[in-house]
Image (cartoon, rainbow, N blue to C red):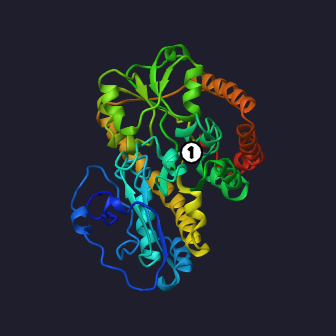
């Protein structure tokens, strides 16, 4: 269950007692009316940027998206009923990061005629925000929505699919996932853990982070109390920072009380929603640690294998659409927020070439160490690197230089 701003898509409330998997053949084409939507819609949250509802008449959905969802729709009588609880790592009010899964849930409900109902739970309501992998792997939750850097200590190769420092940006990452062997490697990594992962969202580069003091040289990172996840966190550690991982909801207070000297988290819109500009003066870019940030729908493998192929196709196709719509939404909204930060007196900075070179050198060292310690890390990282290098000439020649104006 989640709340959203007025006018945004809202998942219908459902009793938490129904979170256990319930997959059965439907004998009826009809479903009971969904209750409580208006009440949920009226619970407003600040700075929420809603997605178009799946059945909206006032929003024009992209033709390709509309066509793809139409093709996989089928009479409800031919489908099975799926009732899953889906805990999320991010609040549903967070732009493109947390509101993508509610969009997926609402869209699946519409195109399936109500037979696929993925009830979304806010962070901590069903399982802790950083425990989604464990819950889905153990079958305590049928599915979950997560970023893969959070289980780095348990599945080292997982974080490569979440983000790679100095790695591929979203369009190139998606190309690798769909046409370069990435998805097959993803399934290989997670199969031993009883998880079927689905690429289900991707957003623009994150900011490098918020800092309570100015960062002028690599030496300024030594001893810095910094929140960072995934391999980006290991790079900060390599450069002397004291790194911890905390969920987004705890970061404002940690910065305010001085528990942290800085944090990276997400897009400018998300950082705005979490209020970081009120407790940290310096805002650094570019997001070298996460040129793309990729989210996934985790499904318990046993639960996935019980589904009919048609139901599986509907879920996977909707997630593919979510990758596009999340990225488009993320790209559309950042400029206005940066302008707001300027008015609020935020000291926006870009890391210079000396800083970026230090981060890049530490990244090479970290990835060499991780690849030597884990065969699957090496396999995935080598695949990503080879794909990026193979396409580098196309990117260098085919696109306008970014410094050309």
Q: Residue at x 21, y 64 (%)?
A: 39
Rendered view: 201 above or below 233: below
Is any atom of residue 169 visible in this view? yes
**Residue 105 in the image: x percent, y percent?**
43, 64
Q: How many marks?
A: 1
Rendered view: 316 above or below 380: below
Q: Residues within 10 Å of mark 1 (few under 14, many from 20)?
A: many
Left or right of 370? Residue 5 is left
Rendered view: 158 above or below 359: below
Mark 1, secondary structure of its residue? loop
Front-most of residues 196 and 165: 196
Q: Circle 1 is placed at which residue position? A: 292
**Residue 175 in the image: x percent, y percent?**
67, 55
Is any atom of residue 204 visible in this view? no
Q: Residue at x 29, y 31 (%)?
A: 278
Q: Quadrant of residue 368?
A: top right
Q: Which quadrant would the C terminus be assigned to in this image?
A: top right
Q: Residue at x 30, y 73 (%)?
A: 34
Left or right of 363? Residue 229 is left
**Residue 236 in the image: x percent, y percent?**
55, 24
**Residue 43 in the image: x percent, y percent?**
22, 57
Q: Which quadrant would the N terminus be assigned to in this image?
A: bottom left
Left or right of 251? Residue 5 is left
């Amino acid at each position: 269950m989640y709340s959203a701003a007025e006018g945004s898509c809202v998942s219908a409330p459902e009793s938490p007692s129904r979170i256990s998997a319930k997959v059965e053949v439907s004998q009826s084409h009809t479903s009971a009316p969904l209750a409580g939507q208006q009440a949920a819609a009226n619970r407003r949250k600040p700075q929420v940027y809603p997605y178009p509802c799946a059945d909206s008449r006032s929003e024009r959905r992209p033709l390709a998206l509309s066509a793809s969802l139409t093709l996989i729709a089928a009479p409800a009588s031919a489908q099975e009923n799926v009732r899953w609880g889906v805990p999320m790592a991010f609040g549903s009010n967070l732009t493109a990061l947390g509101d993508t899964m509610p969009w997926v849930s609402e869209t699946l409900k519409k195109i399936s005629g109500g037979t696929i109902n993925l009830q979304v739970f806010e962070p901590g309501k069903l399982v802790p925000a950083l425990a989604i992998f464990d819950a889905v792997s153990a079958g305590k939750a049928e599915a979950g929505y997560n970023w893969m850097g959070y289980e780095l200590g348990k599945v080292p190769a997982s974080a490569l699919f979440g983000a790679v420092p100095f790695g591929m940006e979203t369009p190139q990452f998606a190309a690798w996932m769909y046409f370069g062997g990435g998805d097959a490697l993803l399934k290989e990594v997670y199969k031993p853990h009883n998880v079927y992962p689905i690429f289900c969202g991707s957003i623009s580069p994150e900011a490098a982070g918020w800092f309570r003091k100015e960062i002028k040289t690599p030496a300024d990172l030594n001893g810095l109390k910094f929140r960072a996840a995934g391999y980006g966190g290991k790079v900060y550690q390599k450069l002397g920072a004291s790194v911890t991982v905390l969920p987004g909801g705890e970061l404002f207070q940690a910065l305010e009380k001085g528990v942290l000297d800085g944090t990276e988290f997400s897009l400018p819109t998300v950082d705005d929603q979490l209020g970081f500009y009120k407790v940290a003066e310096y805002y650094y870019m570019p997001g070298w640690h996460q040129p793309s940030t990729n989210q996934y729908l985790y499904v318990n493998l046993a639960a996935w294998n019980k589904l009919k192929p048609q139901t599986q196709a509907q879920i996977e196709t909707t997630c593919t659409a979510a990758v596009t719509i999340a990225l488009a939404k993320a790209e559309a909204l950042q400029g206005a927020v940066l302008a707001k930060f300027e008015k609020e007196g935020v000291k926006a900075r870009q890391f210079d070439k000396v800083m970026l070179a230090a981060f890049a050198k530490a990244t090479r060292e970290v990835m060499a160490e991780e690849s030597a310690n884990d065969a699957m890390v090496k396999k995935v990282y080598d695949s990503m690197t080879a794909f990026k290098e193979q396409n580098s000439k196309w990117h260098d020649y085919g696109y306008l230089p970014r410094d050309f104006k």
